[in-house]
Amino acid sequence: MSTVDAPRSPYARTQRSGTNWEKWGWMYMRASGVVLVVLIFGHLFVNMVAGEGVRGIDFAFVAGKWASPFWQVWDLLMLWLALIHGANGMRTIINDYSSSVTLGKVLRGAVFLSAAALIILGTLVIFTFDPCPSVSPEQLGLLPSFCPPQ
Amino acid sequence: MSAVTAPRSEKKPRPGGTLYRGYTGMWSWVLHRITGVAIFFFLLVHILDTALVRVSPEAYNAVIGTYKTPLMGLGEIGLVGAILFHALNGLRIILVDFWSKGVKYQRTMFWVVIGLWVVLMAGFLPRQIANIILEVNGQ
């Protein structure tokens, strides 16, 4: 004989097997968001406000920053956290507005591929960067002042 | 027998004045989406232009030079404004989700976000406007 639940018994969530990826995505947006506020506010202050602001940015400026592991790690963290945060946000928006299943798949695929490609590119750039590359004589003046004479 | 006070929401009903429908709750959500999409597309471009440091100092300087033109200078004001709003409103969303009084104060927090945004923009604008004027004068 089967039993019937008592009337007005409290709602119980259906148990699903496996990892709840949507929940971890939701958590990631908030955790990465807090870290990104610090990283990007620092980035904007150093690049856009301190010194000359945007007019002070050139190869020598970037080389001066990436000669230090501090800014390499800073920018690497920004790269990974921001691109994954942005790509997941775009995924949410695509899920909300794409009118067809196929269109949604195509758009999500495009977001995933562009984010993955840029994470790989950016990581390679940060780790293979040489602040004092060998350059043609007319570009010698563009190198940072700490580079040894060529 | 002591009188039972009615819940605050029954005293003064606000049609549609829920957390996400209408008023500041909805408009902050709309702005969060628009600024988020704009920042994402800028990020894609920004990583590509920075990657030019691996090509040559000349190539990087040529492209970063376009960021210093007056028109791009105005665009950067919009970009920084979008980032500051998205960042501050994101912190507001976290407080709505995790702080026990977050929902109660979400409207107040929206205006705190706007206030902080104005203060931070006031810290950025003098430098940026000075740079735009220098560029317009060809200095």
Image (tube, coloured by chain):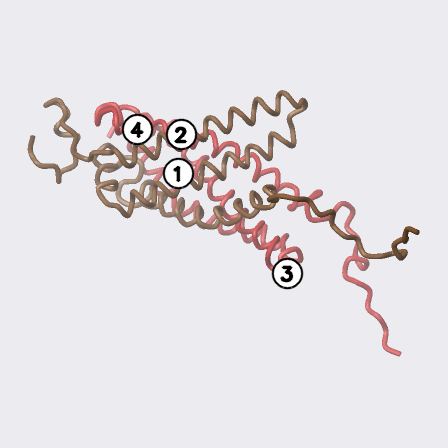
Determine whether the residue tagged by mark 3 lies in a helix, strand or loop: loop
Give the x, y percent position of residue B120. Answer: 43, 48
Q: Are marks 3 and 1 on the same chain?
A: no
Q: Are marks 1 and 2 on the same chain?
A: yes
Residue A79: mark: 1
Residue A118: mark: 2
The chain coloured red is B
Decide: few, some or many residues near mark 3? Use Cα within 10 Å; few <14, some 14-19, many ≥20: few
Q: CA distance from mark 1 to mark 2?
A: 9 Å
* Disc 4: which residue: B64
Quadrant for the C terminus of chain A, please. top left
Quadrant housing residue B56: top left
**What chain does mark 3 sit on?**
B
Reading the chain from its start, which is encountered first: label 1 or label 2?
1
**What chain does mark 2 sit on?**
A
**What chain does mark 4 sit on?**
B
Give the x, y percent position of residue A108. Answer: 56, 27
